[in-house]
Amino acid sequence: ADFTFSNDMNLMAAAPLSMGLLTHNEPPTWHPASDALKEACKKAAKICEEGGVNISSLAIRVALSNLKISCTILGMKNIEQVKIAAETAKKFDNLRATKQEDGPEFLKSILQTNEYEIWMKLSNKVNGPFSSVWRDGTFRWDGVKDAKAFWKQLPDVTTEDWQIR
């Protein structure tokens, strides 16, 4: 985000719920994340639940709070998720911030006190639920490789077909 901002480009982000990982439900069985990342997300969801925070709403607000990202695409599969996204977006009504004000203080102004405290626990790189996956690099997955594998499973579709769909 810093690179695109400093070069006068816009950045679009997608999947702030990490394709279902940052919800209170199990991710889909086909999810390409490592087992370690899936477990870290379960721990994060439990921390949120114990603190009375909806992890999906928190994840969306954290994503939207990065003012250097001009567009965040949300995928929603049911009415409940649409309602959560709408309520989350309302938190940004009447906020006046510039891209230069982006950062922890802006995030703090969007979150309630308990939500910010939970966020601090989740983002703790030493003791937080994601600390081990940040250390060993298992917080990433290769979406291109997984997309190719998906298209190869379909009957009568060649590897080249997925590239033009």
Image (tube, rainbow, N blue to C red):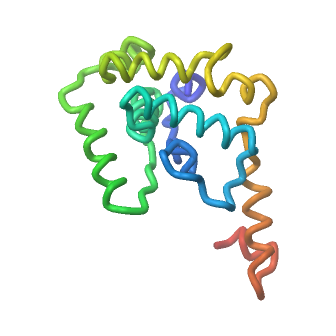
Q: Which residue sits furthest front?
A: 50
Instruction: Give residue 65's quadrant in the image.
Output: top left
Q: Which residue sits furthest left?
A: 94
Identify which residue is drawn at 61% across, 59% down. 28
Rendering coords of residue 56 (x, y %): 43, 41
Q: Is residue 115 left or right of residue 149?
A: left
Rendering coords of residue 89 (x, y %): 29, 39
Instruction: Give residue 35's quadrant in the image.
Output: top right
Identify which residue is drawn at 55% across, 28% down. 1
Name the foreground residue: 67 vs 17. Answer: 17
Name the foreground residue: 162 vs 122. Answer: 122
Rendering coords of residue 123 (x, y %): 56, 21
Instruction: Give residue 132's quadrant in the image.
Output: top right
Q: Is residue 8 left or right of residue 40?
A: left
Name the foreground residue: 138 vs 162. Answer: 138
Name the foreground residue: 49 vs 23. Answer: 49
Q: Where does the C terminus fall, quadrant-wise?
A: bottom right
Q: Is residue 64 left or right of residue 6?
A: left
Identify which residue is drawn at 31% across, 23% down. 110
Identify which residue is drawn at 65% across, 34% down. 40
Rendering coords of residue 77 (x, y %): 43, 62
Above or below for 117 versus 50: above
Above or below for 27 versus 118: below
